[in-house]
Amino acid sequence: MNNFLLSTPTRIRFGEGQVINLPKEIPSTANILLTIGGGSVKKNGILNAVMSSLQDYKITVFEGIEANPEFETLLQAIELGKRESVDYILAVGGGSVLDGSKLIAAGIANPAVEPWEIVTSGGKAAKTALPIGTVLTLPATGSESNGNAVISRRSTGDKLGIASPLFYPRFAVLDPTYTYTLDERQVANGVVDAFVHTIEQYLTYPVNAKVQDRFAEGILCTLIEEGPKALQEPQNYDVRANIMWSATMALNGLIGAGVPQDWATHMIGHEITAVHGLDHAQTLAIVLPNLMANQKETKREKLLQYAERVWSLDPCDEESIDRAILLTRDFFETMGTSTRFSGYGIDEPKIERIIEKLNEHGMTALGEHGKIDLTSCREILEAAR
């Protein structure tokens, strides 16, 4: 096991009705900027529950953060926050709202820094950030308990990640009942995203990190078991609870501590979203099975372990690797998430444009060994047609 430093500072309030405890988490003197997405939290009553819990607070609401949060929209929120002199951010929504709120918190707190510089620096240009609280409505990204975010800028075709300990939410309210009204596409996206987060910290090479491996395998098995059930039984509390907790645990730092990681699927996927506008999870489903096949020899030992422990296949049979990759693809398809460009009506993917953006962003040596170069990326994308 490799050396590691792990801190998971986010307080989790998990379970039905936890929104009433918001006043226990947010200082009574806070001047809050409450951020939301397209308005679904208004329709399903979640925003009313939050506002009711915080009725004695000063609150300014910013609405309109998109899926794949757009820098231009977040800039408007930053300006609003400065005008209103807010000192606390409360993000109510899914991963995109939470991600966008992290840049908002940094942008308001660093008035001398151009917000796009915070993005292009990967978050390093932010020297401080407003405190952030979260009420999660769509389990997927793990953004409710990590310091990461991904920001898009349509005008330049960029989709870039930022990360900093400053961006960790102070707390997260996780109420599984808040996921009951998600549509099938949102449920599928969340499950696929959490699955790939786990894979990218697990499917590399062995370092004898037994606890992390077993945790990761447990998350993967849970998602495989519960994901299809969530589509069939949308108001099954236990199913929703297990999916919600799996998504949080997939990217709060625990399973990635002390192990090599491979985020090539995400890096390639980000560029697909920037070029073709597909949902984040859809791009991951396109890339992962083909990347697994492309990197079969490099990942051989962990692929055999994955085949045995997650899919109950014979670890001594080389054909188990191909079978495990096929079962992974089938799982995504069962969730209604296509694993090929053609499944989204893209018969001629802009592969060269995607490769150009990877090169522009310095993504030329990806993977746990830094050996997934642009040639490998092109092969992976060609196989995903």
Image (cartoon, helix red, strand yellow):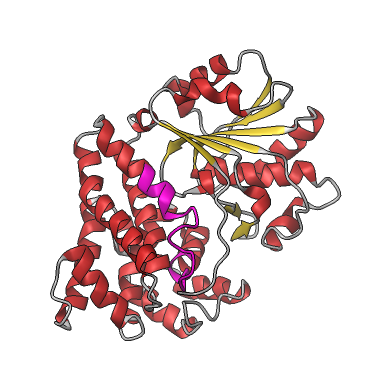
368 within the magenta span: no
Residue 92: image x %, image y %?
53, 32
Q: Is residue 227 above or below residue 39?
A: below
Q: Is residue 49 left or right of residue 147?
A: left
Tell me where residue 175 appears, x and y as whole percent. Answer: 41, 31
Residue at (26%, 70%) from the top-left corner? Answer: 306
Kindly identify the residue that appears in the image at 48 percent across and 85 percent down: 371
Q: Nearer the viewer, residue 10 or 236?
A: 10
Question: In terms of image quadrants, where is residue 294?
Answer: bottom left
On the image, the x and y values in percent for residue 303 come to: 28, 75
The reply to whether residue 85 is in sight is yes
Residue at x 20%, y 61% (from the top left corner)? 330
Task: Kindly give the residue lying farthest to the right in the view shown.
Answer: 112
Q: Quarter holding the N terminus?
A: bottom left
User: As rendered, which of 376 and 125 lies closer to the eye?
Assistant: 125
Which residues lie in the magenta part? 245-266
Question: Does residue 70 appear left or right of residue 267 in this picture?
Answer: right
> Is residue 345 shown to the viewer in this render?
no
Image height of 164 relative to 262, above or below: above
